[in-house]
Amino acid sequence: METKALIDTTPRFAQRSIQLVLVRANGPLFYSVATASLLEALAPLYADRMRQLFRKDEVFSAWMDKEWLPRKAARAAALRQYVEKTWPELDWAAAYEQCRCTVVSDGGMGPLKPTAAHEALAHCVAATQSGVFYRSVARWADDAQLREMAAGMAREEALSFGHFRAAYERRARAQRFGAISAWRTASACMRTARDLHLAMAFRALGAHCRAQVPFPVLDYPEFLTRMRAVIECHAGLGTRERILLRTWKNRPRIIKRQETQARVSRDFRPVLQAAA
């Protein structure tokens, strides 16, 4: 009986081992999931201005504090746990601290939104971008656990978008926030997300990875190119999403000073190429 059980379970263990090798060797997956874990953990810092602008909206403020932020915290914890378990080469805590210090010193926040309508729209854009990203990971990743986790996060972003959109529409009417201003704000938010927030997290990963990593080291423009291909293939973008996200196809504008992408020895070569 014990021999038979061992024979029956051995293929499953072998399959898990092969799957783990493929996941760990996927550079774009590492950079995308790890940056997401950092940005999710920074959500409370980015929420302070929204709290101030909507402090008189008791229902919306209660939803933020009792539902949205706790879900973001749980999501950040789950992603951090996954990243640390799958890629122990990354010092996640040090990478987060680097990002936190950047945000606190105002380098990571980006341009301030002048009105509550601007701020709510910025969160609508962020929810859309995050939803597309998690939807893509849910269909692309080799790890079933990660796919399931990402699918749940995509659903959460869709629910959050509804709340932010309702808040935006209420304030847009009151503040006479027109379509042209909305489009300009949305485009600026996407450029800030790509050229500032995501780039900040990407640099932190490069600065806090150990020398030998199991995936090809990417620079930021190459990472963006790889992930655009993943999203176009797996996100199932609708017409509105394609129009909204086309800003990501432009060349990054706000790349800050280049830090060491990763302390990788010249003689080291990853075992496998990126899986994207």
Image (spheres, helix red, strand yellow):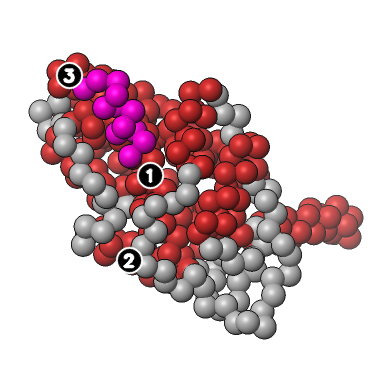
Estimate the x, y position of residue 235 in percent, counting from the top left.
Answer: 59, 34
Q: Is residue 230 left or right of residue 38?
A: right
Q: In what element is the residue under mark 3?
A: loop
Q: Main secondary structure of the magenta part?
A: helix
| Mark 2, residue position | 97
Is residue 46 or residue 57 the one in the foreground?
46
Residue positioned 55% across, 36% down in the render: 135
- Which residue is under mark 3? 176
Which is more foreground, mark 2 or mark 3?
3
Of the residues under marks 2 and 3, which one precedes in the sequence? 2
Q: Earlier in the sequence, mark 3 or mark 1?
A: 3
Callout 3 amino acid: Arg
Which stretch did the figure color magenta? 177-188
Residue plotted at (34% across, 33% down): 186
| Neighbours of disc 2 within 10 Å: few (<14), some (14-19), many (20+) | some
- Disc number for residue 191: 1
Which structural element holds mark 2? helix
The percent position of residue 91, horizontal first and vertical second, equals 45, 70
